[in-house]
Image: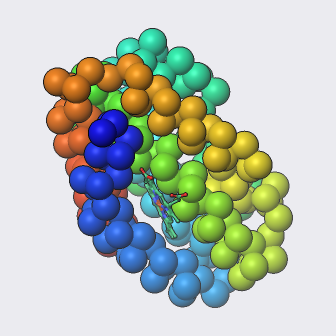
Amino acid sequence: MNLSLVLKDKTDISHQQLEKLLVGKLKSIAVEADYIEILKKFYGYIKPLEERISKNLDINKVPDYPERRKSDALELDLQYFNTTSDVSLCDDLPVVTNTYEAIGALYVLEGSTLGGTIISKMVSAKLGLSASEGLSFFYSYGSETMKMWEQFKIALNTRVAEEDWNMVIIGADETFIKFRNWLE
Ligand code: HEM
């Protein structure tokens, strides 16, 4: 057994619940303004969460963290739609006070690149936008997405001792649950 498999298993239900809520929202996108509302929600959660992750993550555990996707991409997308003011930030975030909880939260954000590929296709088809037209966050790492994911899983499986797994799992599950609460 390795940590990436345990994480997938233990957070499966929370992922499904978040995915279900989000798919409903994505299906009801009719105009750009509907998509902008979703972008604002993502930014409102991910921006402050990333600050907590950056403050607590031991960079040796995820060595390529600086190259990983940041809320900068969401900012870019919001700028594309001229929507930079009037974005509220979530104040009920998961607890991230050590590197293991930070890794758990990061697992959720990194994994969202996998769903992101599907989301960017859905939105692109609905609104006729290309990746550079307000879709950069969901476009994730483009053709590198699977490679980045595999590398992240290698870090999970080789750099976290089994006695610390539980903190990662709790951090990840809380990150899914609080995100769903925020989106509701
Ligand atoms: C429309 C919404 C979504 C869809 C359709 C979706 C779909 C998927 C799919 C198909 C996978 C599996 C990919 C594979 O195993 O190759 C996956 C994995 C994952 N997704 Fe989502 N997703 C969605 C939203 C999200 C969001 C919003 C997050 C987090 C904020 C998220 C986090 C994850 C994580 C962490 C994994 C990795 C699971 C593992 O350990 O293998 N997903 N998603």
Q: Is residue 38 left or right of residue 93?
A: right
| Nearer the observer, 8 or 97 | 8
Res 157 → quadrant: top left
Residue at figure coordinates x 46%, y 83% from the top left: 24
Q: Residue 124: x percent and y percent?
A: 74, 72
Residue at figure coordinates x 33%, y 36% from the top left: 2
Q: Is residue 110 left or right of residue 4?
A: right
Q: Is residue 158 left or right of residue 151?
A: left
Residue at figure coordinates x 17%, y 24% from the top left: 163
What is the basis of the colouring in this image? Answer: rainbow
Q: Is residue 94 visible?
A: no
Res 57 → quadrant: top left
Q: Residue 30: x percent and y percent?
A: 64, 87
Work out whether 135 lies above or below 43: below
Work out whether 152 lies above or below 75: above
In this view, the residue farthest toward the top is 60
| Nearer the observer, 51 or 113 | 113
Total marks in image? 0
Q: Residue 31: x percent and y percent?
A: 67, 83
Q: Which of the image's four quarters has the C terminus?
A: bottom left
Q: Residue 51: x percent and y percent?
A: 41, 30
Residue at figure coordinates x 30%, y 39% from the top left: 1
Q: Is residue 112 visible?
A: yes
In this view, the residue farthest toward the front is 1
